[in-house]
Image: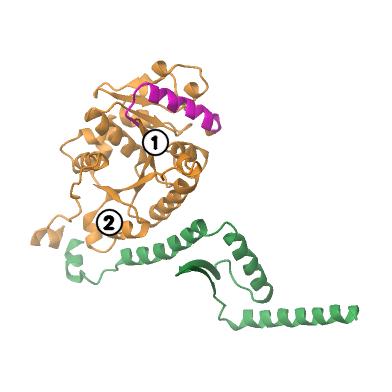
Amino acid sequence: MTKTIVVTSGKGGVGKTTTSASIATGLAKRGFKTVVIDFDVGLRNLDLVMGCERRVVYDLVNLVNQESSLNQTLIKDKRIENLYILPASQTRDKDALTIEGIARVMHKLKKSDFDYIICDSPAGIEKGAKMALYFADEAIVTTNPEVSSVRDSDRILGILQSESRRSKLNEDPVKEHLLITRYNPTRVKDGQMLSVDDIVDLLAIPLLGIIPESPSVLDCSNAGKPVILDDESEAGQAYSDAIDRLLGESKPHRFMEAPKKGFLSRLFG
Amino acid sequence: MGFFKFFKSGKEEQTAKLAKDRLQVLIAHQRTDRTGPDYLPMLRQDILDVIKKYVSVGDDALSVQIDQQDDCDVLELNITLPEDAESTEHASTVAKRRALERQQETGSVT
């Protein structure tokens, strides 16, 4: 059974692409045949974060328009077995995508025995974002501890509940997961940042993980490597925990506590 | 500036609390819009237009909510009227004018 998961947020710049790359890589690393699709037609970026930008020949729009085959279009990851990237088109606009066209692509992927299809949504609530979430069985709502991001996440939850394929066909609703990114426990402790509890309270959906603000996220995207592959970093470990929870394991949440500071560093830090 | 911060810690502004309070209101609003019946936003707009005929209020002066109590739906309207005298004065002038107009209309019919 193929599972389709959309990574969405409404707001831009909260870490959708970083999350898509790491979730897809994490699932493939655990042996699942996984493809990650960039739905941001016109503003392709997943290829850069995955480090395969020089290997893009065909893209999603070619595939939708039947100008290329699935095998020609999918880029096989060089690090991880079972991981494939389906890049967005850089030159076309979002109108090039249609529900029927995407449905054909999804059908082909299912026939090719993919276990997971990860859809990296563009920002906003326009056509591109709606296309990305339409076929979802599950949704990872990426949220920063910040007012506009939380509000937009709630908005996108409304759209998931009313405009996804599952809602239109009256099937079981899309399973929602909250992923909090760029979390800074020190600022939370000082009362300057919304806490995990605040956000869970406001959005009222189950928590998949907390990704702490970490310099390794930028380091990894600079290098074109999904941060989950950086086992040393807190962000990488947090994504790895999130994969376990996605697969049904229950794991305590980490990286929520502010590091304890000594007297001197509190005085001068 | 850690040195100074150390001594005034505890007095710092807890902006996260503010953020949560603001979001709670917003999200509750967003949710009634999407869980309530389809006509709710239109009903809200129509009622607001009627209020605006008599009182000059902003677009956020009216909140419409549907709550469930036992087995009946309760439609709750909350109208915030402005406090300043000028707008009330304006409103009463408008109301008087309308009353006058109505009298004239009925007068012409009879």
Q: Is residue A152 above or below residue B104?
A: above
The answer to which image quadrant residue A238 occupies is top left
Q: Report the magenta residues as a range.
A: A95-117
Q: Is residue A157 above or below residue B86?
A: above
Drawing shade for chain B: green
**Circle 2 Cα neighbour tier, 10 Å, few/some/many (<14 / 14–19 / ≥20):** some
The answer to which image quadrant residue B82 occupies is bottom right
Q: Is residue A167 above or below residue B98?
A: above
Drawing shade for chain A: orange
Residue underneath mark 1: A120
Task: Check if residue A108 falls in the magenta segment.
Answer: yes
Query: Mark 1 and mark 2, same subunit?
Result: yes
**A101 lies left or right of A113:** right
Q: Is residue A106 visible to us here?
A: yes
Q: What's the residue type where badge 1 is placed?
A: Asp
Disc 1 is placed on an element classified as: strand
**A226 lies left or right of B30:** left
Q: What's the residue type where badge 2 is placed?
A: Val
| Quarter of the figure that contains the C terminus of chain A | bottom left
**B15 lies left or right of A250:** right
* Chain of the residue where label 2 is placed in the rendered structure: A
The answer to which image quadrant residue B50 occupies is bottom right
Disc 2 is placed on an element classified as: helix
Percent coordinates x, y for residue A113 in the rendering: 34, 23
Judged by its main secondary structure, the magenta piece is helix
Percent coordinates x, y for residue A111 in the rendering: 39, 22
Give whichever of B52, A171 is nearer the camera. A171
Residue underneath mark 2: A196
Instruction: Point out which mark residue A35 bears.
Output: none
* Chain of the residue where label 1 is placed in the rendered structure: A
Give whichever of A3, A191 is nearer the camera. A3
